[in-house]
Amino acid sequence: MAFTAADVKNLREMTGVGMMDCKKALTASDGDMDKAVEWLREKGMAASAKKAGRIAAEGMAFATVVDGVGVVVEVNAETDFVGKNEKFVDFVKGVAATVAKENPADMDALMACKYNGTDLTVEQQQQEMVLVIGENIKVRRFARFGEGVSVSYVHAGGKIGVLVNLETDLPAEKVEEVGKDVAMQIAALNPRFWDKAQVTEDVLAEEKKIMMVQMENDPKMANKPEQVREKIVMGKLNKFYAENCLLQQEFVKDNSMSIEKYIASAAKALGGTITFKNAVRFEKGEGIEKKQENFAAEIASMVKG
């Protein structure tokens, strides 16, 4: 399978590895991007694969709590300018309020709901916004927590929206700070899993395989007995959990404890119990490919004309 210069560039963006090594990896992997990432990891060049897919779509990710119901939504627009428009922001907040009140089962159900405070459906209100603002606007996704205590956090004016759901015997206002700290951690580090118990066997097997190959490629490790290398791998897996699982991650505000320990110590100080149940993190434009304009080519064609 052939590969292009764009593939080399994408691999570099995903792994942070130099262009020449990315080219070697794609050559060795016959142009297969996933295999190229694995090749680089086995050589110890890439610590981990960043999520593929450039984040390019505009709009807003928004999280809020309405009458005890937690909601996070993403609404897309074509330009960053519209994403900051007051009418657009009000529309996004209205969508969130509709989700909280109506509890739609899915996107189709949401679009058919009456938009909060109007006789129009969400779909009709969205069409109105397109006419008013003059850009394509689309409600993309939502999540809702009706049980427990939810805490919301919006980062950088709508770049990231996080909703954290806790189970507690304490009043909601008492656990607000704990929920906000956890939400900020999720916004900043974007963990792959909430808890190490969620890490599947196939993910662990893949990590173990890569670690073993890394050691075989390391002259200091290659001659060590199999059981010694297995022991080292187990130690490295603990590091994998600490990097990829929220509850096992080092708490950004206090690196002497994990998030799990922070929640437990905060609950003890408040005289109650707090359990992390779930969370949702939406990043604006996540996974949406946006048309890349080639301005140099455009200007060149204008000059020729």
Image (cartoon, helix red, strand yellow):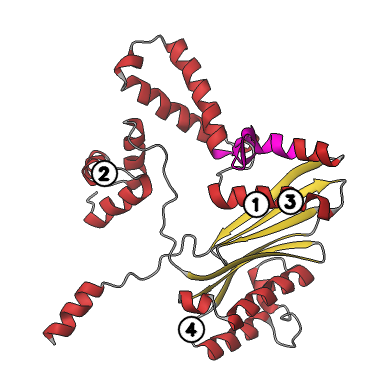
Mark 1 sits on what residue? Answer: 183
Mark in front: 1 vs 4: 1
Mark 2 and mark 4 residues within 8 Å of each other at the beta carbon: no
Q: CA distance from mark 4 to mark 3?
A: 38 Å
Q: Which mark is residue 177?
A: 3
- Residue linked to disc 4: 135
Amino acid at dot 1: Ala
Q: Residues within 10 Å of mark 4 (few under 14, many from 20)?
A: few
Residue at (41%, 43%) from the top-left corner?
49
The answer to whether mark 2 and mark 3 are in CB contact below 8 A is no
Looking at marks 1 and 3 on the same chain, the residue that comes earlier in the sequence is marked by 3
Spot occupied by residue 253 in the image (x, y as percentages of width and height): 62, 42
Pick out the residue farthest to the left: 304
What is the crowding at mark 3: few (fewer than 14 residues within 10 Å), some, or many (at least 20)? few
Measure the C-alpha gap from mark 1 to mark 3. Answer: 10 Å
Mark found first going from the N terminus, 1 or 4: 4
**Up-down relation of residue 210 to residue 37 (above or below):** above
Residue type for callout 4: Glu
From mark 2 to mark 4, how far is it between C-alphas?
39 Å
- Residue 118 x, y percent position in the rendering: 74, 86
Secondary structure of the residue carrying numbered label 2: loop
Residue 234 lies in the magenta-colored region: no
Element at label 1: helix
Residue 17 screen position, x and y as percent: 30, 43
Kindly report the distance in space between the C-alpha atoms of the residues bearing marks 1 and 4: 31 Å
Q: Residue at x 22, y 55 (%)?
A: 5
- Mark 1 and 3 residues: CB-CB less than 8 Å, in contact? no
Q: Is residue 255 magenta?
A: yes
